[in-house]
Image (cartoon, rainbow, N blue to C red):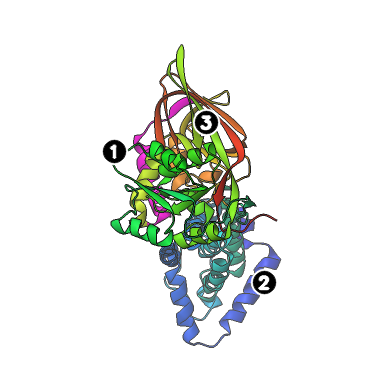
């Protein structure tokens, strides 16, 4: 077999020699220096690591494309050098096949079949192109140039380059199983709701949490200037936020409730608005403004436009029944869930990520925060809808969130009637190592430790020690069980985003 492979099929050998002779007849010129330098730059992947480093400086698709390209390159290089070069020994072209001024010096001593340079080049270009086709198209000429340079410099026969390129493309598409294409996000839409149009803030009561991250002495002045006829209640440190919001909602003459604050303050306003059948205006002013962002309320001007024109959307609300205390004598309470709920290390992960994000950007901050969180914390054992699990993270979003990984950030539709259930489990062998690998490579959504589902009702029960349940960022300790259901379209919120047809 070694002799057969060494000689190669006769037709392939004849074609190789024919093509190499055609290359050898090219006149000497600057292109010889170019291809020799290009070939040298691609040795041991130096060229592709450099390009990946440049791509990684741009957040979003370029950074993900760089990581995917390097992953595909690693697979292609390993398969080519460890397996095929040993299984398919073949002599490289000899000096008599090409002019000496063009011949690579020193010539590699490993098997000519297949071309490792070609495999790495095509793997990186195709792997990056799977994430971003535009980047793949831009990298294609460079990959083709590297592959051709191996023939031009006498390092490989043309068939070596073709086989190596095929291996590189195959490695890239193999990694697509680990790095599946993200599902398309639906266009943001809203279901219209009837609400009164409000001019100059007349009939609007606004609860302002002065502890909100963006609050300043000028905040009150701004609100009074924009809404001169509104009632504005500033909630100071030490006051009960829920009680003060309720007082604003029940003030005589109130036809709509406004809120300025983080997600916890907004949650209190949601409960008051539903209880008193008031439409809600969410002003983007807190430390976290997830719901305001989902609504498209990125500025006071956005909210003012919706109020003035009477634009509003119907929004689903999660209803949580929590049992705490002694197992034989539990205490029952009810909570409203506007955005998310979680059990396990998710709150710690989010806090670390958001602390690092300004300096590192979200993707890198997510990786660093995940490595730290999963490295030092332990999983929690509980049952979810009757099934026992050992979990790192139990995450529930009220509505479908995107992307489908451990860091969801967007919710295009607010009344889809479902919970977005995500579990990262520790049940599988080597679960921690699998999880950390998935985080580093950005393949959490495709990992075997990740379980994605949708549900209209979810029941969570503690096993042994009670749980700490976080609902919209507010922790509730001592939880023995919690049942989540959806209340469809019970909340009306002023919103200027496009509505459903």
Mark 1 highlights which residue? 238
Q: Residues within 10 Å of mark 3 (few under 14, many from 20)?
A: many
Mark 2 highlights which residue? 15
Which quarter of the picture shows residue 225?
A: bottom left
Is residue 55 shown above or below 288?
A: below
Q: Residue 372 lies in magenta, yes or no? A: yes
* Front disc: 3 or 1: 1
Residue 487 in the figure: left or right of residue 423 = right
Residue 139 in the image: state x and y as whole percent.
Answer: 53, 69
Q: Quadrant of the C terminus?
A: bottom right
For the question of whether residue 51 can be seen, the reply is yes
> Start and end of the magenta stretch?
361-382
Which quarter of the picture shows residue 474?
A: top left
Among the two numbered marks 1 and 2 on one chain, the one whose residue lies closer to the N terminus: 2
Among the two numbered marks 3 and 1 on one chain, the one whose residue lies closer to the N terminus: 1
Mark 3 highlights which residue? 320
Residue 382 in the image: state x and y as whole percent.
Answer: 48, 24
Residue that appears at 50% across and 87% down: 28
Residue that appears at 52% across and 74% down: 149
Residue 496 in the image: state x and y as whole percent.
Answer: 56, 58
Q: Residues within 10 Å of mark 1 (few under 14, many from 20)?
A: few
Q: Secondary structure at mark 2?
A: helix
Q: Secondary structure at mark 1?
A: loop
């Amino acid at each position: 077999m070694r002799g057969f492979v060494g000689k190669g099929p006769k037709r392939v050998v004849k074609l190789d020699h024919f093509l190499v002779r055609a290359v050898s007849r090219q006149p000497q010129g600057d292109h010889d220096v170019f291809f020799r330098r290009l070939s040298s730059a691609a040795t041991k992947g130096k060229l592709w690591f450099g390009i990946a480093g440049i791509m990684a400086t741009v957040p979003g698709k370029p950074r993900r494309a760089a990581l995917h390209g390097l992953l595909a390159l690693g697979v292609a290089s390993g398969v080519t050098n460890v397996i095929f070069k040993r299984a398919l020994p073949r002599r490289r072209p000899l000096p008599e096949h090409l002019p000496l001024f063009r011949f690579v010096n020193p010539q590699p001593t490993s098997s000519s079949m297949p071309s490792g340079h070609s495999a790495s080049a095509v793997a990186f270009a195709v792997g990056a192109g799977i994430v971003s086709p535009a980047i793949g198209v831009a990298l294609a000429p460079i990959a083709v140039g590297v592959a051709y340079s191996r023939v031009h410099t006498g390092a490989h026969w043309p068939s070596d380059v073709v086989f190596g390129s095929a291996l590189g493309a195959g490695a890239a598409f193999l990694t697509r199983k680990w790095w599946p294409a993200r599902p398309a996000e639906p266009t943001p839409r809203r279901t219209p709701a009837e609400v009164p149009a409000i001019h100059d803030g007349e009939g609007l009561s606004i609860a302002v949490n002065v502890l909100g991250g963006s609050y300043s002495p000028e905040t009150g002045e701004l609100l009074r200037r924009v809404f001169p006829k509104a009632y504005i209640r500033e909630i100071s440190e030490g006051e009960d936020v829920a009680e003060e919001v309720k007082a604003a909602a029940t003030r005589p003459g109130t036809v709509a409730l406004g809120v300025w604050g983080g997600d916890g303050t907004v949650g209190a306003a949601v409960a008051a608005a539903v209880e008193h059948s008031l439409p809600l205006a969410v002003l983007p002013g807190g430390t976290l403004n997830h719901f305001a962002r989902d609504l498209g309320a990125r500025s006071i001007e956005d909210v003012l436009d919706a109020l003035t024109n009477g634009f509003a959307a119907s929004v689903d609300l999660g209803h949580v029944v929590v049992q705490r205390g002694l197992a034989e004598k539990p205490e029952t309470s009810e909570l409203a869930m506007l955005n998310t709920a979680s059990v396990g290390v998710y709150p710690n992960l989010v806090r670390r990520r958001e602390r690092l994000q300004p300096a590192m950007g979200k993707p890198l901050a997510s990786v660093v925060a995940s490595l730290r969180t999963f490295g030092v914390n332990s999983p929690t054992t509980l049952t979810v809808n009757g099934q026992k699990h050992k979990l790192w993270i139990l995450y529930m979003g009220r509505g479908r969130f995107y992307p489908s990984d451990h860091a969801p950030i967007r919710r295009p539709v607010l009344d889809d009637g479902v919970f977005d259930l995500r579990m990262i489990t520790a049940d599988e062998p080597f679960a921690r190592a699998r999880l950390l690998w998935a985080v580093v490579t950005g393949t959490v959504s495709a990992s075997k430790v990740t379980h994605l589902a949708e549900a209209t009702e979810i029941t969570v029960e503690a096993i042994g020690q009670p749980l700490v349940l976080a609902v919209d960022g507010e922790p509730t300790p001592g939880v023995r069980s919690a049942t989540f259901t959806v209340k469809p379209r019970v909340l009306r919120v002023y919103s200027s985003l496009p509505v459903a047809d």
